Image (cartoon, rainbow, N blue to C red):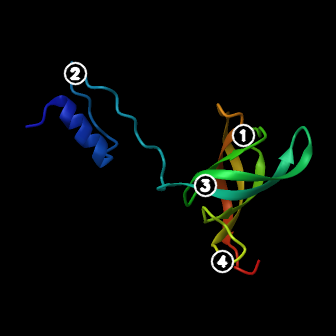
Amino acid sequence: MLDDAAYAKFVYILGMSSVQPIANSSLPSIPTERRNKPRIQVAFPALVRGNDADSGKFQEDALVDNVSASGVYLRLNRFLAPGSSLFVVLEFSQHPSPERVVPRLAAHGTVVRSEVRHDGTCGLAIRFLRHRFLDSAA
């Protein structure tokens, strides 16, 4: 039989989202995963185009922290407010090279979360509105 702490850990590992609390229990609260799609946690380069309220149109290199089928979290050197529309091109390679063909994804999206990070960059959570893979010759 599992004690309360072991049961809570077991439920958390299995990813079960509906756990009924045990009365008078001192179990720690377990965060519920809200994402619908699994994420790939890896650093990829990206190119971001959009409109900045301060300086107008921009194009900037960015670094992807994670990506899923529905969006991307990346770091940019400028702050963008939630609701901003962006065009993003992701290169699925940690070491891009002109000699190698790497898969690329082009996406139009909307900033759903924006946060200033400790390193001075802005972390942006972007929800894809539409996306497509690019030809290797593009």
Q: Residue at x 24, y 20 (%)?
A: 26
Q: Which numbered circle lies on residue 82?
A: 1
Q: Which numbered circle lies on residue 25?
A: 2
Q: Position of residue 67 (x, y in %)?
A: 57, 56
- Determine whether, in the image, residue 128 is placed left or right of residue 7: right
Q: Please identify, in this view, whether the residue under mark 4 or under mark 2 is nearer the observer.
A: 4
Give the alpha-carbon distance from disc 4 to disc 1, as whole Å: 33 Å
Q: Earlier in the sequence, mark 2 or mark 1?
A: 2
**Which residue is disc 4 drawn over?**
101
- Determine whether, in the image, residue 137 is placed left or right of residue 21: right
Give the alpha-carbon distance from disc 4 to disc 2, as whole Å: 56 Å
Residue 96 placement: quadrant? bottom right
Q: Amino acid at mark 4?
A: Val
Give the alpha-carbon distance from disc 3 to disc 2, as whole Å: 38 Å
What quarter of the picture does the N terminus occupy?
top left
The total of numbered circles placed on residues is 4
**Which residue is disc 3 drawn over?**
71
